[in-house]
Image: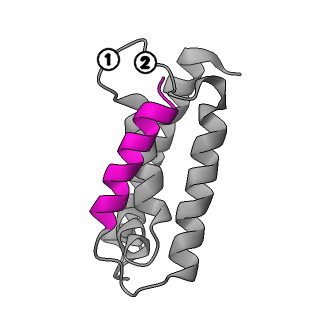
Amino acid sequence: MFGQTGATLGGALLFLILILLDIWGALDSKPGNTPSELIRWLSRYTAIIPWALGVLLGHWFHPWDGLDGIFGSASTWVLIGVSVVVLAARIFFRQKPLWDAWIWAALGVLAGTFLWPV
């Protein structure tokens, strides 16, 4: 929709806004109100945050150029379905807190690499 340049500028702007919010929250007297602290806190209780961050990393940083989704054009729908299953599994099979967030992030990287490569 916006093209490569628009997506790059939008991502850079979002990144800058998150950094500024993080600095602003860190200078505040309230503990735990920065975006990075909120993401870290939420990641203890739900797998969807580390999963989503892993999928984005796998989407952007994969091993070689020209990689296509392993299910062709249906790969995006498979990724959406797998993401729904991950979310549902964490809702219905709840454990507190979630200490294995890195596993969900690693699985998300694999899913983003093979189901949604750039």
Q: Are the residues tagged 2 and 1 within 8 Å (C-beta)?
A: yes
Q: Which residue is mark 2?
A: 67
- Seen in the picture, residue 19 relative to 65 is either above or below; the reply is below
Q: Quadrant of residue 29?
A: bottom left
Q: How many marks?
A: 2
Q: Residue at x 45, y 44 (%)?
A: 55
Q: Residue at x 36, y 84 (%)?
A: 97
Quadrant including the N terminus: top right
In front: 66, or 10? 66
Q: Main secondary structure of the magenta part?
A: helix
Outermost right residue: 1
Q: CA distance from mark 2 to mark 1?
A: 6 Å
Q: Quadrant of residue 26?
A: bottom left
Q: Which residues are magenta?
A: 101-118
**Circle 1 crowding by C-alpha within 10 Å: few under 14, some 14–19, many from 20:** few
- Seen in the picture, residue 93 relative to 23 is either above or below; the reply is below
Q: Residue at x 59, y 33 (%)?
A: 75
Image-based side of 112 in relation to 26, left or right: right
In front: 75, or 10? 75
Q: Quadrant of residue 66?
A: top left
Tag of residue 64? 1
